[in-house]
Image (cartoon, grey):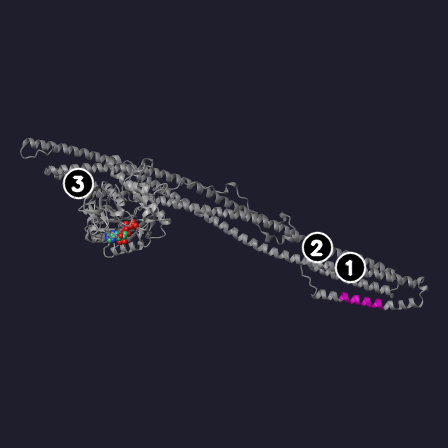
Amino acid sequence: MEKICVAVRVRPPVSQDASVATYWNVEDNRISLHRPHGTPISGASYAFDHVFDETCSNAQVYELLTRDLIHAAVKGFNGTAFAYGQTSSGKTFTMNGSANDPGIIHRAVEDIFEKIQAMSDREFLIRVSYMEIYNEEINDLLSLENQKLQIHESLERGIFVAGLKEEIVNNAEQVLHLKESGEVNRHFGETNMNVRSSRSHTIFRMVIESRGKDTNSSNGYSGSDAVRVSVLNLVDLAGSERIAKTGAGGVRLKEGKYINKSLMVLGNVINKLSDGAKQRGHIPYRDSKLTRILQSALGGNAKTSIICTLAPEEVHIEETKGTLQFASRAKRITNCAQVNEILTDAALLKRQKLEIEELRNKLQGSHAEVLEQEILKLRNEMLKYELEREKLEMQLEEERRSHKERDQCIREQQMKIENLSSLVTFSDCDRNSSQEHDSRRESPKEEGIDSTIKCQGDIFETPCFKGAPNNFVVKRSNYSNPPDFSPLPDSFSDVADEDTWFKMNKGYVPDLDSLQMTPARKVQSFPPSDVTLTPVPSNEDYKQELENLKRQLEVLTEEKNELQRKHTEQILLNDQLMGEVSELKHEAKIIQEIPERLHESVASCKDIYEDVMSTMQSFASNGESSTAKLLSGTSEIGRTLFSTLETHFAMVMNHKPVHANDSVSQEQYKELSESLKSTVTSLVLSEKPMENKQVKNPQCSCNSKEYTWDGETAGWMEKSSNGLNSIKEKYHDLEKGLDKNNKLLEVSKERYGSLEREFKLLKEERDSLLRTVSESSQQLALLTDQKENVLKDLSTEVQRRKRLEEEIKQFSVAFASRQRILVSIENEFQSTIEKMRAQNPVSLPKSLGS
Ligand SMILES: Nc1ncnc2c1ncn2[C@@H]1O[C@H](COP(=O)(O)OP(=O)(O)OP(=O)(O)O)[C@@H](O)[C@H]1O
């Protein structure tokens, strides 16, 4: 057990104010508040491991405070050095330094590589990361895309920040370059107190792994030696600040609140730890991300040094006193630093054999004092192992709990997969039913569609989609979120006021019992017996993998739902289109029937007309008379007219466009007009003699046969011309109707065309949907496989844990027996001493054996 090393550093004053009433005096390792004439003020004197006045450089601070810690880190001890103090007191200056006087981080990096160079019997692997805690969120300073990272804890890695970028480095320049690049991403801001004030806590981390080289072994590595892994944290905290002094508002104020709150939690942790093991109770490490990350540095297994920076100005006296009180409490904390080794079985055995051999030698040589020390040491070690065992047991318990949670998670996933599988099955059924329907539609007779429309049936090939069953929509299960290992304190809003600041700096501890219990700290442990430094997949990896699977499943489910939605939309659209199509079919049928009906009516008109004509011709006995001529002319016109109409309708019925200027029509029109002309001419010629007759003998004409015939002829003519005119009008009307119908037909045809295209697209879309569904089902099958593999891995892991538990038990039994041996050795030794004393009471010191 060793105490945390605490030093205080006073920065040079910003201005030399002659009218000061008090000042801080530094003498050796003591700092005290004095009046101007030199009298010390009682109750304001503090002693620390080191006190650096304003003349001290970063080089001196490094030499005295941090060097040993850095060297220990190279040897395998976890180490943490951090700077604490009010804003603008010189924390960043101490950690980062200036061009002329590099800070602790710069010097540590160079020192580490120098030290490594000197240790030729070991080989090293160094990884570097750099993070900041800004407004209680962890950001990666080496990779801007890694923001809002989470803290996790695992048996293998202890407490760690998931997703933090770690760069493997080979030399100091590389590390310093990385640090520079990270520095750019840090949050700085201007306040009344500091033009470049750190608005976040930063942690520069180096993980140092090493193993011994064995020059005799064939592979160059020592087969029996262990791998050492140590973590070095170099922390530059943001400064506590009084809002009244910094003049912070808006963003600065919010930052200030977060900074003060997390520093208050740090103060509380330090207070609790300084209470001593018996009184300390629950340590609220989980109340802030900072204390959670620094957990092993505060009362854990790390070597820790704290440098508290002070602003000497009289105006800052209260803050300085607060910092000194914090430092005093930190000084009381003890850590249990130890080398972090991962021992192979062979190494453990060899080491124990050596120890026993050593003991035996010592016993034989009767080096009583040394033996006594050895026994004490072993007792201590035994206690340590006992503790270790207890911790491991607790970890196992926790592991079991998380395993249970994982199981639950897997079960939920299983349900999801099953739901999705049923979806896939449904989609397959759906596809089959569509195919069935398609095959049914290949025999159009069954559908009872008119033959003229049937020939276009393929155009309307619409898949008849089945309605979605109720269980189609997968209900999302509410996954329990992964346990947050570092819950945020409820509210940060009430922190930045003066009262809180004072409480914080005067060691006020809020009612911590009301806070959530922090589970026991986990000792940093590392993957067992992996001398090749290959990372072993941990529970965290499994958890990560499970998370990934979960995410993939969620994405797939969403995709499925989206597909289903589209599918339903398409069914609706399809139905709509089908309705439109049947309406159009009906319309088309009517349109197509019109010319036929017209044709029929023209034919019947023609028959009637011919009957009328033949009757009229039978009346006209003399074929030479004008009436006969008129009749034959009219009959000729009527015939031509009807045959023209017939031709037109026949063309329409055969779906040929009818244009007034095509050759057939022109010929018919020509014929029609010629017959009309000749009829009219013959009529005119025959009318003239009749007129003459009527003028010469008007009285007798009323009784003569000739007169009767002429009157009849005129009546017939008038009737015929009226009939002709009405036929002509009808013809024109029919022609107009035909034109209209033709246009309607064109429009319908266009609509058919666009519907056909639309159907084609829909068909393609449906095919692609079916393809996606089958791909999804394949993916699901793959995921199920993966899940099964994960389950297998998990059960292997459980087996491993069980074995580990068994080993721990055996280990404790072995230790118990070893303890018994040691006790018997001790007894034996005591009796030997007694005997020797009895034999030679003068030569042996009295203290021996007592
Ligand atoms: N020991 C020192 N020697 C010379 N200058 C110093 C020393 N300590 C601090 N300074 C100067 O004081 C100013 C404030 O120091 P710095 O930014 O390091 O304070 P800080 O504690 O990190 O502040 P904040 O918490 O606001 O980030 C800087 O200009 C810095 O160069």
For the magenta stretch, what is the residue range?
671-684
**Residue labelled with disc 2:** 594
**Residue labelled with disc 1:** 727
Q: Of helix, strand and loop, which one carries label 3?
A: helix
Point 43% across, 45% down: residue = 553
Residue 119 in the image, given as x and y percentages of width and height? 19, 51
Q: Of helix, strand and loop, which one carries label 2?
A: helix
User: Is the shortest distance between ligand 1 and the CB of mark 3 under 8 Å?
Assistant: no
* Dot in front, 1 or 2: 1
Point 81% across, 68% down: residue = 678
Point 84% across, 61% down: residue = 718
Between 442 and 736, the one lying in front of the other is 736
**Left or right: residue 651 compared with residue 370:** right
The answer to whether residue 619 is seen in the rendering is yes
Q: Earlier in the sequence, mark 1 or mark 3?
A: 3
Residue count near mark 2 (Cα–Cα under 10 Å), binned few <14, some 14–19, many ≥20:
some
Between 516 and 799, the one lying in front of the other is 516
Placement of the C terminus among the 4 image quadrants: top left
